[in-house]
Image (cartoon, grey):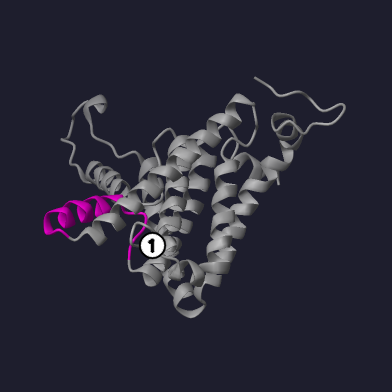
Amino acid sequence: MRQLRHLTGHHRTVTSNRVLGLLLAFNAGAVNAGGFLVVHLYTSHMSGFVSMLADNLVLGNMALVLGALGALLSFLSGAATTAVMVNWARQRRLHGSYALPLLLEALLMLVFGLVGAVTLLWRTPFAVPMTVLLLSFIMGLQNATVTKMSSSQIRTTHMTGVVTDLGIELGKMLYWNRTGSPPETQVRANQQRLRLFAGLLGMFLVGGVAGAWGFKHLGFIFVLPLALVLLLLSLPPLWADRDRLRAALGTSGPGLPPPLA
């Protein structure tokens, strides 16, 4: 339990960032690939939605313009929600600063898994099913959480930056240093970053395969174990913070500490 609490705690280490990043990369790959089978859109790819918005503005297809705009706004709202939650937790000195957005993500995934078929039928003013907006919001939540906890060094919901950084490190590794050149001028790959980016890419791919298989053979219920993993990550630190949470929410009883500034 202590190890799980440290994974989402305020005090970050290279190891905790790497482990949490790998777990969330698997989760993002599964949701992204599985969601594509359901809604035929990759809901973590905001570059694609921006391009869709631009293309269809020119073509005059307002239904697709509204759909792309809705996904963008949902992703943006998810990222903003993470920022609000993390800063609220930090101001109250909670140990699990990043547990709140992960808990919300887990709850939303549980909703998606239990009533996914209903959300597919529920049309929104953005001309897309609620499922698209929900998955985009979830991806925004997660990407902002990992971005903040790693000081913008790790991304998990899209692989463009990861593959770019992996390619840079591979280029350094393959670079031929001239014989006799001083050590300080030699080009060397950062082995730690190389392993991290390779691991993120691998976990996203494995998660994608698992998500595609799960949605194809099991349907929406497949997201339930993914949500349970997020609950296991978020609940231990929140349980450790329970007294401070009660105080911060104004429900503290006698003897409980007051809210912390």
Q: Is residue 241 left or right of residue 50?
A: right
Amino acid marked by disc 1: Leu
Please tell me whether residue 52 belongs to the stretch shown in magenta: yes
Q: Residue at x 49, y 52 (%)?
A: 24
Please rate how many residues cluster around mark 1, counting C-alpha atoms within 10 Å: few if below 14, some from 14 to 19, many from 20. some
Q: Residue at x 51, y 34 (%)?
A: 84
- Residue 123 drawn above or below residue 152: below
Of residues 244 and 127, the one nearer the viewer is: 127
- Residue 133 drawn above or below residue 75: below
Magenta span dominant secondary structure: helix
Of residues 57 and 178, the one nearer the viewer is: 57
Q: Residue at x 22, y 58 (%)?
A: 62
Find residue 171 and report its horizontal and vertical position in percent: 22, 45
Q: Quadrant of the C terminus?
A: top right
- Residue 99 drawn above or below residue 206: above
Of residues 192 and 96, the one nearer the viewer is: 96
Residue beneath label 1, please? 205
Find residue 239 and report its horizontal and vertical position in percent: 73, 42
The answer to which image quadrant residue 5 occupies is top right
- Residue 158 drawn above or below residue 248: below
Of residues 46 and 127, the one nearer the viewer is: 127
The answer to which image quadrant residue 109 occupies is bottom right
Q: Which residues are magenta?
A: 41-60
Say what secondary structure mark 1 lies in.
helix
Please tell me whether residue 164 belongs to the stretch shown in magenta: no
Q: Is residue 209 visible?
A: yes
Q: Residue at x 48, y 80 (%)?
A: 217
